Image: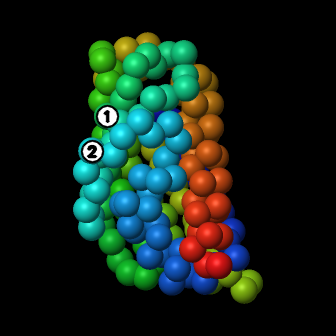
Amino acid sequence: MVHLDGDENFDQPPQLVWQSLTDPRFLCECFPGVDSIVRADEHSAALVVRPGFSFVRGTLEVSFQFADVQPPRVARVAIQLKGIGSSAILDARFEVTPFNAGSRVTWSAGVRELGGLLKAVSHGLLEGAARKVAADTWQQVRCKLARRSN
């Protein structure tokens, strides 16, 4: 299965980074290819995205819920993807710590289950797509955090 992890450094203080990353409305604004936000509350969200990958046609319904939150540092997120003939369940986790004058986010995400047509997609193609989504999402988080701190 696909598993990604990494570290992201931010100029903003840990409190601001934590508040932003645990706000589903903020995260919906950062996810690439958002077509519409169906619902966003304090602990969960659902949105429709148009992924830019040839192996996924149409739209995907993405829903996520914070499953374990340990303020002000650690959170785990359960993510479900559903599309025409495809589905996936993912788990993500992140930890926010002070770093230099700002913050560091240590994160990981992994696919727990693939369904439908996604089962037939090669591991390399799925991992490449997941890396692209992660990089684009972190870039948007970075931009939006910079605007929030100004």
Q: Residue 62: x percent and y percent?
A: 34, 40
Q: CA distance from mark 1 to mark 2?
A: 9 Å
Q: Is residue 15 left or right of residue 143?
A: left
- Residue 124, placed above or below residue 69: above
Q: Residue at x 30, y 16 (%)?
A: 85
| Quadrant housing residue 115 | top left
Whether tag 1 and tag 2 are in contact, CB under 8 A, the answer is yes
Could one spot residue 51 in this view of the protein?
A: yes
Image quarter (top left, top right, bottom left or bottom right) of the C terminus: bottom right
Q: Residue 120: x percent and y percent?
A: 43, 13
Report the mark closest to the observer, 1 or 2: 2
Q: Is residue 84 left or right of residue 121?
A: left
- Name the image colouring: rainbow
Mark 2: secondary structure: strand
Q: Is residue 13 left or right of residue 78?
A: right
- Residue 43, placed above or below residue 50: below
Q: Is residue 114 left or right of residue 21?
A: left
Of the residues shown, which amino acid type is indicated by label 1? Glu
Of the residues shown, which amino acid type is indicated by label 2? Val
- Along the viewing direction, whichever of 139 and 79 lies nearer the viewer: 139
Could one spot residue 114 in this view of the protein?
A: no
Q: Pointer 2: what residue?
A: 38
Q: Residue at x 62, y 31 (%)?
A: 128
Q: Residue at x 35, y 77 (%)?
A: 70
Q: Return the disc, 1 or 2, that comes first in the chain's sequence.
A: 2
- Residue 130, placed above or below residue 22: above
Q: Residue at x 42, y 52 (%)?
A: 28
Q: Residue 15: x percent and y percent?
A: 51, 83
Mark 1: secondary structure: strand
| Quadrant housing residue 111 | top left
Q: Pointer 1: what residue?
A: 61
